[in-house]
Image: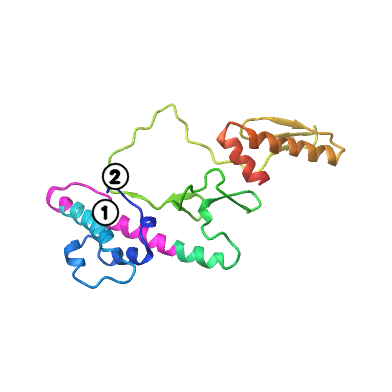
Amino acid sequence: MEVFDPVRYSLEENKFFLSHLCESPVSALQETLPSGVNPVAVQEVLGQLYELEELNKHRGIEWAGKEAISVTIEKYLTEHDRWSEMSTRGAPRFPTMHAWDGRGRPHRGGISSDSGGVNTYFDENGERVSFRVSLRDTAAEVFKAPWVKKEEPIPDALIEDTENGSLKCPVDGWVANFKVDSRQSYNMARARMSRHCKSSKDDRVREFGTKVFG
C-alpha cells in the first residue's frame, strides 16, 4: 500500500484506525471488532502503518507520519457528516462529484469534478484537496520543469466592452461582437460565446464555460 485513502474504508473502519494508528494489527485484532470493521482492512492498513513507523524508529526511514494519517481521517469523517447535513437542505449528497458554475449550480460529472467516486473535498477557498496521503518519499522533491508556469485560476466572468460592443473570453481571447443599443444582439453574443466555450478543445475554456454559463 503506497497511498492511504480514507474514502476506501467504511466510517467505522476509519474510526477504528484513528483509535489504533501505528499499533500492531496483532494487538488491535485482540479486541472484538466493532460492527462494520473488516479484519482484512485492519490488517492491511494498521500492518502497513506499523511497519513504516518501526522502520522510522529503527532505521530512520521517513514516511508521511501518524499525524498526516490522523488529519486526513478526521477530515474525511467531518466532511462526510457535513455533506450528509447539507444534503437534507437540497445539496448533492457528494458535492465534489459535481462541477459548480458561477451561479452556484452543480453539474454532475462536469470538468474538474471527482470521477467514479469521491476523491477530494473543498477547502475554505473552494479549492479541491485530495484525501489521499502518499505514505513514502514525502521528503523527495518532485521535479518541476522551469518552463512550466503555475496555472492561473479560472476567471469568474467575461470581459465586457459595452462601449464598443464586445464580449471576450478571458481564457483564450475569443471575441463575440454585439450592437451596443440592442439587448437581443447582446444576448445572441452571449449565446455564441457559450457555444464557443463549451465546444472548445481547451479544457480551461470549457471549464470557464461551465463556470459562467452552467
Residue occupying image coordinates x 74% and y 35%: 192
Residue occupying image coordinates x 50% and y 49%: 127
Q: Residues within 10 Å of mark 1 (few under 14, many from 20)?
A: some
The reply, left or right, for residue 170 in relation to residue 188 is left
Residue located beneath label 2 in the image:
138
The reply, left or right, for residue 198 in relation to residue 23 is right
- Is-magenta flag for residue 76? yes
Residue occupying image coordinates x 68% and y 39%: 158
Residue occupying image coordinates x 57% and y 32%: 202
**Where does the magenta region start and end?**
55-78
Residue located beneath label 1 in the image:
65
The location of residue 124, given as percent across then percent down, is 50, 56
**Camera-side residue of 176 and 206:** 206
Answer above or below: position of 178 versus 69. Answer: above
The location of residue 91, given as percent across then percent down, is 58, 61
The reply to whether residue 42 is visible in this rendering is yes
Cα separation, mark 2 vs mark 1, equals 9 Å
Mark 2 / mark 1, whichever is N-terminal: 1
Answer above or below: position of 11 versus 204. Answer: below
The location of residue 186, given as percent across then percent down, is 80, 39
Kind of residue at badge 2:
Thr
Q: Residue furthest left?
A: 58
Kind of residue at badge 1:
Gly
Please tell me how many numbered marks the rendered image carries.
2
Instruction: Please report contact status of discs 2 and 1: CB closer than 8 Å, yes or no.
Output: yes
Which element type, helix, strand or loop, lies under badge 2?
loop
